[in-house]
Image (cartoon, coloured by chain):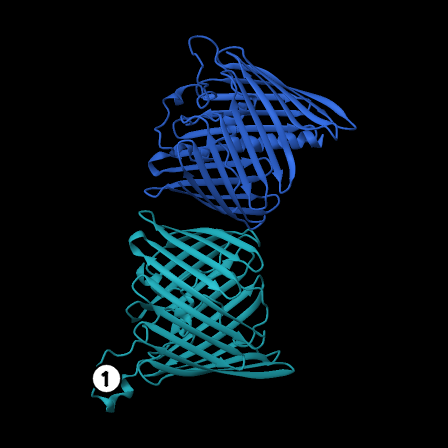
Amino acid sequence: MGSVLAASSPSPPPPPSAAGSASPGVTMPPGFGMPPVPPAAPPTGSGAGKEQRAESLLPNPGAFDECHRKCKEVFPMQMEGVRLVVNKGLSNHFQVNHSLLLSTTGDSSYRFGATFVGSKQTGPAEFFPVMVGDMDNSGSLNSQIIHQISSRIRSKVAFQTQQQKFVNWQGDAEFRGEDFTAMVTFGNPDVLAGSGIIITHYLQSITPSLALGGELVYHRRPGEEGSVLSLVGRYTASDFIATLTLGSAGAHASYYHKANEQLQVGVEFEASSRMQDSSASFGYQLDVPKANLQFKGSVDSNWVVGATLEKKLLPLPLSLVLCAFLNHQKNKFQCGFGITIG
Amino acid sequence: MDLIRKHCAHMGSVLALSSNPGHQNWPFSKDPLPSRWDAHPAHWDRPPRWERRDGRLPNPGSFHSLHRSCKDVFPHQIEGVKMIINKTLSSFFKVSHTLHLSAVSPSYYRFHVEHLQSDDYSKDKDAPALIGEMDSSGSLNAHALLHLTERVRARTVFQSQQSQFVTWQFETEYRGSDFTAAVTVANPDILRESVILVAHFLQSVSSGLVLGGELVYHRGRAEEGGILTLAGQYSRPNWVATLNAGKGGAHASYYHRANKQIQVGVEFEASTRTQETTTSFGYQMELPEANMVFRGMINSRCIIGGVLEKRLTPLPATLIMGAFVNHRGDKLQVGLGVNVG
């Protein structure tokens, strides 16, 4: 089952957001990132004395969306109500999951998801094509197909519906060069209405630890069109990663630090010119493998304090998740727990 | 009539308080399982010290605890996150801090203190004690249980909601050899000329059968009245059946201990005032090897609930997780709790 699990999305996708129209800058639903790729690590010292071949020793910088990912993974995910997830692997290629969510605030839902992994192997834990889909009890569908077309080109097609209406349909192609990555995404192209979003990403390794790049979003609707440009810089060291995104839509800076085997820390700062506000958050992740425990905590500048505790209940293939979030400013409290089987 | 309802509701909450607040932890107390568990379950936790079981009929206990063995099987509704820290300062003095973070009601911190007047307090819920509880909003809950003589007990209860007193009652109970008689004066108010007087009487008729009654007299400025309720309880070693019937309604409960691990309770309540009836089914499952107790219940109001308590050895902590679903109203309540000490 390892191949299926490694190639599929890291966690079941959260319920689709209520927003109907795609806004500029949004590329794909959260949790639907590309399967993990080998991390961009600086070469260990084999570059010394080989300046004439320095360019070919620059590592591929990875996907554009992965820049802030490591920092975001440290933060706990808010959850409420009771959740039961049952994962069942039917074969080496096929995995199925059922998820039942009883919610205290919204509607309860049952979701069925299936993951299919093909047999074309490109890396140690990567198999293509990958097809992931899930369906809600109200009929909302989330699906994506990821395929490696050639050794350097990977493409993805994703669809998302809210009950019977399609809210998101996009296709993208990513080219991984020796030391750069370029990606083009077509979001919600609608030939009849003459609307759509085109996003291009480019990320280039300048030195083994520094990667610079940019994102250009062009959106068009009948009557208006516009574009947003943002620049990205990422510096990777042996135990920290600092990333900065600057653009006309706002700024996003994140810092990820791995203190030791057990403790990881992340600091994030976001400013949005459209909504005219900014927020800073601090999060940490504590792993205690001996106790099969993982604890994530976060503090926010919006006076939100939250924590998640995840514990594997060996010898059963059970995992228990407890979560609580407290918003001091609005005096709101949310708690939830979940069980994952399999 | 509302005063009666409030009085009866408060009597219930008074009981919940005066019974050992750590009662939920009872299966995990440091004492081994009591050797009396095979005895009549109605009396197994509460025999008075002077009771003589030499062929004479046992004392039937107090009127409030008639339905207690069935009610203990049902899970308590929990909501939000609750942290309780119990600290025993000496064999007479216990203190507990409670912090409750809730999504639907205001969060609070509560301080609870117990002073016991005898140090062999194990599971006897009516041992003499002074109990006080204060909320972060200023609400006070105070009980005093005293043994005036060997057979006469007195209990005083004061409850205030922030600064206003809602309950002040005084109860005197006489425990004879095979009967119990109690008189309670609740909320006597000279200025408003209102009072509620309750008289209880329970008599052991045979070794398993207890019969009795309750007479409630309430008087307000504009009205006065009395309600008579008859009560009967039949207990065998493995089950207890209780019935209260009167003009105000009926309350029947059946408790059954299937084996060492499973206890089952069925309850039926009917009220003539609100014109509705409720039937509930509850069960309790104990797994001492796994240090776990699970209580589940289902209701005729389409409410399903379950609460799991797990002792996290070797830490002196207990983790409580529970959820209640109201299918008719489509509402869910989730709760987590940690009891330390």
Looking at the image, how many numbered discs can be counted on the residues? 1
In the shown orientation, is residue A27 left or right of residue B277? left
From the top left corner, tell me how far across and down residue B94 is, in percent.
Answer: 44, 36
Residue at the top extreme, as displayed: B55
Residue located 65% across and 82% down the image:
A223
| Chain B: drawing colour | blue
- Residue B320 occupies which quadrant of the picture? top left
Residue at the right extreme, as displayed: B222
From the top left corner, tell me how far across and down residue B289 is, in percent.
Answer: 33, 36
* Quarter in which the C terminus of chain B is drawn: top left
Q: Pointer 1 indicates a residue of which chain? A: A
Residue type, mark 1 in image = Gly
| Chain A: drawing colour | cyan
Query: Of B338 and A65, which appears nearest the observer?
Result: B338
Residue located 59% across and 68% down the image:
A20
Query: Of A20 and A291, which appears nearest the observer?
Result: A291
Asked if residue B89 is positioned above or below residue A285 in the image, the reply reads: above
Q: Secondary structure beneath disc 1?
A: loop
In the shown orientation, is residue B281 left or right of residue B7? left
Asked if residue A33 is positioned above or below residue B5 in the image, the reply reads: below
Asked if residue B128 is positioned above or below residue B82 in the image, the reply reads: above
- Residue A296 occupies which quadrant of the picture? bottom left
From the top left corner, tell me how far across and down residue B141 is, in percent.
Answer: 57, 36
From the top left corner, tell me how far across and down residue A62 is, in percent.
Answer: 36, 77
Residue A34 seen anywhere in this rendered image of the structure: no
- Residue A255 occupies which quadrant of the picture? bottom left
Query: In this figure, which residue is indicated by the disc labeled 1?
Result: A47
* Quarter in which the N terminus of chain B is drawn: top right
Residue B273 seen anywhere in this rendered image of the structure: yes
Residue located 74% across and 30% down the image:
B191
Query: Of B92 and A48, which appears nearest the observer?
Result: B92
